[in-house]
Amino acid sequence: MMTDEQLDEFRVHGVKIRVVRDSEPENDVRGIVVAWDDESVMIRRPNRNIVKVSRAYPIQLSSLPRELVVPGAEGRADS
């Protein structure tokens, strides 16, 4: 999960981000961080719509290649 400091840095600098919700790239949410709380992040999409998504989803820089990260898999070891 992104820290408040990271989200604030993205908001202040207007960095375009990608929220990876599942394995399908078409379902990614791309835009600019506008607000957040303990459980969710609000993203302004290019069409100016605001989308509220869970902070549990991986957030990546949109300028970098997409990485599929399974939410909730951090720290989990395969046996």
Image (cartoon, rainbow, N blue to C red):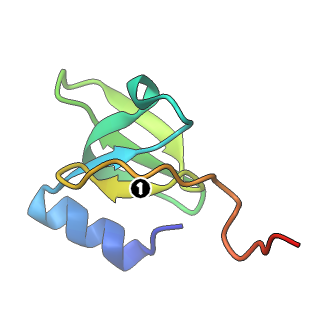
Image quadrant holding the N terminus, namely bottom right
Residue extending furthest toward the front: 79
Q: Residue at x 22, y 60 (%)?
A: 11
Image coords of residue 10 (percent x, y): 23, 63
Tell whether 2 sits left or right of 15: right
Tell whether 3 sits left or right of 5: right
Image coords of residue 68 (percent x, y): 49, 49
Task: Examine the rendered structure and indicate whether residue 76 appears above or below residue 16.
Answer: below
Viewer-closest of 4 and 69: 69
Task: Examine the rendered structure and indicate whether residue 57 appears above or below residue 31.
Answer: below
Image quadrant holding the C terminus, namely bottom right
Q: In the rendered image, which residue does mark 1 sit on? A: 59
Image coords of residue 30 (percent x, y): 29, 37
Tell me the crowding category of disc 1: few under 14, some 14 to 19, or many 20 or more residues within 10 angstroms, Cα based. Answer: many
Total marks in image: 1
Task: Examine the rendered structure and indicate whether residue 12 appears above or below residue 5.
Answer: above
Q: Residue at x 41, y 45 (%)?
A: 19
Task: Give the secondary structure at mark 1.
Answer: strand
Residue type at numbered disc 1: Ile
Image coords of residue 12 (percent x, y): 15, 65
